[in-house]
Amino acid sequence: MTEAPSPAAAAAERWRDPALPAADRIADLLSRMTPEEKAGQLAGFWAMPAEPGEPVAPMEDDSNESAPALDELLPHGLGQFTRVFGTAPVTAAEGAARLRDLQRRVAEANRFGIPAIAHEECLNGFMTWGATVFPSPPAWGATFDPGLVGEMAAAIGASMRAAGVHQGLAPVLDVVRDARWGRTEECIGEDPQLVAVLGTAYVRGLERSGVAATPKHFAGYSASRAARNMAPAPIGPRELADVILEPFVMALRDGGARSIMHSYTDVDGVPAAADARLLTDLLRGELGFTGAVVSDYFGISFLESRHRVAGSRGEAGALALRAGIDVELPTVRCFGEPLLELVRRGDVPEELLDRAAARVLALKAGLGLLDGPPDPAGPDPAGLDFDPPEHRALARRLAEESVVLLANDGTLPLAPAARVALTGPLADDTAGMLGCYTFPAHVGRHRPDLPLGVDVPTLADALRGELPDVAVAPSADVLVTEDDIAAAAAAARDADVAVVALGDRAGLFGRGTSGEGCDAETLAPPGRQRDLAEAVLATGTPTVIVLLSGRPYAIEDLADRAAAVVQAFLPGQEGAGAVAGVLTGRVEPSGRMPISVPRRASGPPVTYLRSKMDGPHDWSAVSPAPLFPFGHGLTWTRFAYTDLRVDERAPTDGSLTVEAVVRNVGDRPGTEVVQLYLADPVASVVRPSRLLAGWARVRLEPGDAARVAFTVHADRTSFTGPDLRRIVEPGAIEVMVGGSSEDLPLRGACTLDGPVRVLGADRVLDVPAEVTPL
């Protein structure tokens, strides 16, 4: 045990004075540290690894080597603890006590008494047993509601901070490029502005609670070839800049994220973990990021074992350190003794250790971890509740706003007296509510006897609570058997309406139909789900298709014959009630598609973000036209758009105003998501046919109207020009307003006057909207 310094010695150590600037404290502290102690701050330790035979990922580090024991690391200090709560089922009290004990051991064992940063996953909520399970990120995207997403993140962060956790590994800011990618369920959507605004709201909420947010994966992960996890990303610098990086720009600058995680992929042959142009020149030099870069799990080891750009663990560590990675997660392997040996030999400058350690210590200073040992009492285990009523209410609001009504011939809302047959693989299964980064799917799936830890009703539970006559014929397996198909058809024949629940069981690395490593060859519904739906439709009973999934599925031939189609993206523990509420009319559908729905399962990737030549045209027999476009969603009422007003001219360094009136012309209240799109008809490089610029959620009573005014700075028309500098060009800008990327009844134009402008880091990123009732 390291003895505490005497008062006189402590006073002489300037780094202990919290009144001094953090930079001065860290400089003093680094001057006192040995290379081993500096390296200790770069090390992660997985305190509670999975049980033998139950790996989180296949061959996680591609090695049979044992990780260093905690006692080996403690004398030199420790940078991070990995998922004390999120690796194995522990109660709130057990997890807090375990973490408190680990922090005590760390602080007592190193010369400076500095504890470690504790991090956890938090994409769908604090990923620990018994914590509220919130909807998945595509559901956030479907809400188009950044305020609500920020509330959710703040609630998640409050639970984590109360438990002694300092850092959350979220949000995922990857822009969906091909929905076959298994991690689509972790992404907000296919539009960079939607991802940027909602992702930044999440970052702000988490940071506001005192937890350091960690946007990921920087950068290019979602653009992998053939949508395969960890595959190379065949993208050019312009697509990288204008699509992939845009959410990170806003989340770092406006959200204030204090850490970031690199991507597993390589772009043009250079792995992100070894790319100094990406992690230093761009991230820090151009974007001004000053926080800590943490490795994705085993990402540094993969430089040796998978990318094959390093010949040893030491070389992998040196490449990552030079590139700009500051912390090795989940457990130190390359940044430990293999890297230190290269430092001692002079092959790696000690200044690089100083650089990374300074960033880690700066993060610790901001989290209060340099201000003395943690409270001996630690968090009060008796007072911790990770699933309080207010969190469940928030999860319910988010789930209800996220349900998208894709099609409806009038069958919905279901008549109260209707005889309903509920069938399909997700009819009576909690799997349709839970993403792969929820505790029940991520860890609990390996422990079938473990209770879920929270109450997660199935769709059958919820629908029975809404309607008096519901017969349930669930499938035995998510991939569907012949018996499942026969039972579903028989149930439908005896009903007034059939509801068929299709979708996903999220998992990891092939242990599910959606989730990390669960990439798909086509976008056909999994297994024989299509056959089951066909059999139900063939009965002639009006059929409602409900998709509880992590990605959009191609259902053209089914949707054409269905009475209604409802999409919910793994909507969390309150999701069943939200979907049932939409089916019965208790809940007003207000969600909009954050990802386009493809027509054909084996067609090309479908995204609205495409150029004219990339869209449907007569020179190709293959069309990427969607079945349901980005931004689409129906309500119980109808809306009309009128009175578009657009400034005729604006300077290239100024703003233009776009106004439109939206009116509820139906007989029920409803919420419209008024969407503004821009297009650049003549540019110096090929541009998308349209780009989402801004939006506003507007709730209107029957007959009521509102004027929506968008303030669009010319910076929002910018793009990466021929010389790879971001520019604003003079000329015409087309303006479109409506209810989806394909439903744009109002169209106008504005001319930007002035010189070509080259933009810097201070460019305007958002498009504010003001709603005025009329």
Image (cartoon, rainbow, N blue to C red):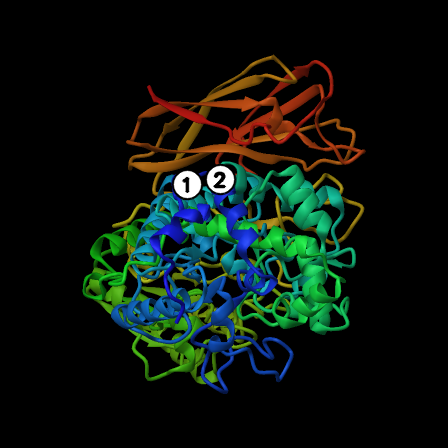
Picture quarter with the N terminus: bottom left
Q: Nearer the viewer, residue 180 or 183?
A: 183
The numbered mark at residue 697 is: none
State left or right for residue 263 relative to residue 681. left
Label 1 amino acid?
Pro
Q: Amino acid at mark 2?
A: Val
Q: Residue at x 52, y 45 (%)?
A: 195
Q: Decide: is 561 above or below 535.
A: above
Residues marked 1 and 2 touching at CB (< 8 Å): yes
Q: Secondary structure at mark 2?
A: helix
Q: Residues within 10 Å of mark 1 (few under 14, many from 20)?
A: some
In front: 42, or 567?
42
Q: Position of residue 754 (x, y in %)?
A: 70, 13
User: What residue lies at 61% left-to-right and 62% top-to-bottom?
Assistant: 35
Q: Residue at x 72, y 71 (%)?
A: 304
Asked if residue 632 can be seen in this view, the reply is: no
Residue 467 position within the rendered picture, expressed as x and y whole percent measured from the top left: 22, 62
Question: Where in the figure is residue 740, as x and y percent of width and height?
Answer: 51, 39
| Residue 581 in view | yes
Circle 2 packing at 10 Å, graded few (<14), some (14-19), many (20+), is many
Total marks in image: 2
Residue located beneath label 2 in the image: 197
Between 555 and 706, the one lying in front of the other is: 706
Residue on which disc 1 sits: 146
Residue 660, position as x, y percentages in the image: 46, 22
Q: Is residue 46 left or right of 669 when viewed as pictured?
A: right
Quadrant in the picture for the C terminus: top left
> What whole-number distance in Å separates the C-alpha atoms at marks 1 and 2?
7 Å
Where, by quadrant of the figure, is residue 773 drawn? Answer: top left
